Image: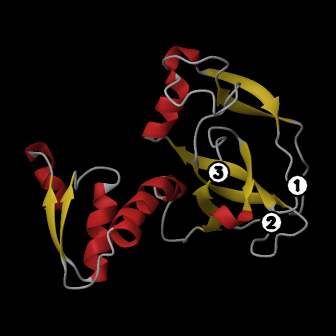
Amino acid sequence: MPGYQRKESMKAIRYHRHGGSEVLQYEDVPVPLVNEREVLVRVHAASINPGDWQIRSGMAGDRFPLPYIPGWDISGTVEEIGADVTSLRVGDEVFGMTANSGACAEYAALPAAQLTRKPRSISHEAAAALPQSACAAWNALFVQGGLKAGQRVLINGASGGVGHFAVQLAKWKGAEVIGVASGRNEAFFA
């Protein structure tokens, strides 16, 4: 990208020990390097999912080494590409999921295969809210559930993060949808 010069450091939210939100720190860290199949994304938006607080609290055990930068869902602009990346170019607006963390930073390195181009019709914020929730809905309906057109499906938590994607995907597939949500969310479906 013309005029792009790699930065040495960036701002990131991370933590060095498990606990509540009090362990989060805003600090300077090195900009990640990319391998041959990765891209460096300048982050415009990231979303937080239940797994993020579960990892932060220590519920996930020691699978994620500390210090840890939270955030798996990401939307941004490709700044660098690895030598083997042919599906994306510098300057592409993309969204997807990181390999295991790092979206809550100025930059994130992630496999190109876990990204796709962001439609121009949606914001970076909307794109960053899609990956985990929409993938969970897709897997539940079609991979695990085998949902087909004409079938009836009951979606509990239909106004929630995964549920509202499940409703849309099931309707798209041609299924009859019965959605369950609390009364306070009735207007969500109006």
Q: Nearer the viewer, residue 23 or 141?
A: 141
Q: Nearer the viewer, mark 2 or mark 1?
A: 2
The residue type indicated by label 1 comes to Tyr
Residue at horizontal 46 percent and vertical 42 percent from the top = 49
Left or right of 26 in this view: 144: left
Mark 2 touches mark 1? (CB < 8 Å): yes
State the CA–CA distance, disc 2 to disc 3. Answer: 18 Å
Counting from the top left corner in percent of width and height, residue 182 is at 12, 45
**Classed neighbour count for the residue bearing mark 3: other residues with Cα under 10 Å, few (<14), some (14–19), many (≥20):** many
The residue type indicated by label 3 comes to Thr
Among the two numbered marks 1 and 3 on one chain, the one whose residue lies closer to the N terminus: 1
> Element at badge 1?
loop
Residue at horizontal 82 percent and vertical 70 percent from the top = 85
Q: Quadrant of the N terminus?
A: bottom right
Mark number for residue 172? Answer: none
**Residue 38 quadrant:** bottom right
In the rendered image, the residue lying farthest to the left is 183
Q: Which residue is mark 1?
A: 4
Q: Which residue is mark 3?
A: 98
